[in-house]
Image (cartoon, grey):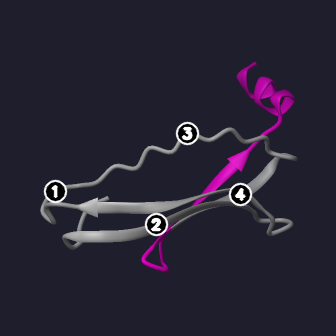
Amino acid sequence: MSNLSEGQHQYAVNIVSDESHAVLCSSAGELIVQDETGSVELFMPVSIVFPAPGKYTVTLHLNGTETLSRTLRVKSMTESQGEER
């Protein structure tokens, strides 16, 4: 991440099912920016089991505002193996 002002910031990352809107994984915390011209990296090891193939959304909130949203497409093992042939 870049373009953050110096100081403390609250963050939250969520992985949400597009179908059921259930939150599968959530992580929150605080990060400290010491130099606003630099960048900050977040490392969040997670263990997650997706209940079904489909679309999921990963969101990043900084200081209570959604700043980033990405679609994550999950396929079943049989779907993935069929594509390799």
> From the viewer's perspective, is the residue at label 4 or at label 3 nearer?
3
The kind of residue on which mark 1 rests is: Gly
> Circle 4 sits in a helix, a strand or a loop, which is it?
strand
- Does the CB distance between marks 3 and 1 fall below 8 Å? no
- Numbered label attached to residue 56: 4
Sequence-first tag of 2 and 4: 2
Q: Which residue is mark 1?
A: 38
Q: Which residue is mark 3?
A: 45
The crowd level at tag 4 (other Cα within 10 Å; few <14, some 14-19, many 20+) is many
Q: Magenta stretch?
A: 61-85
- Numbered label attached to residue 11: 2
The kind of residue on which mark 2 rests is: Tyr
The kind of residue on which mark 3 rests is: Pro
Q: CA distance from mark 3 to mark 1?
A: 23 Å
Q: Residue at x 71, y 57 (%)?
A: 56
Where's residue 45, x and y in %?
Answer: 55, 39
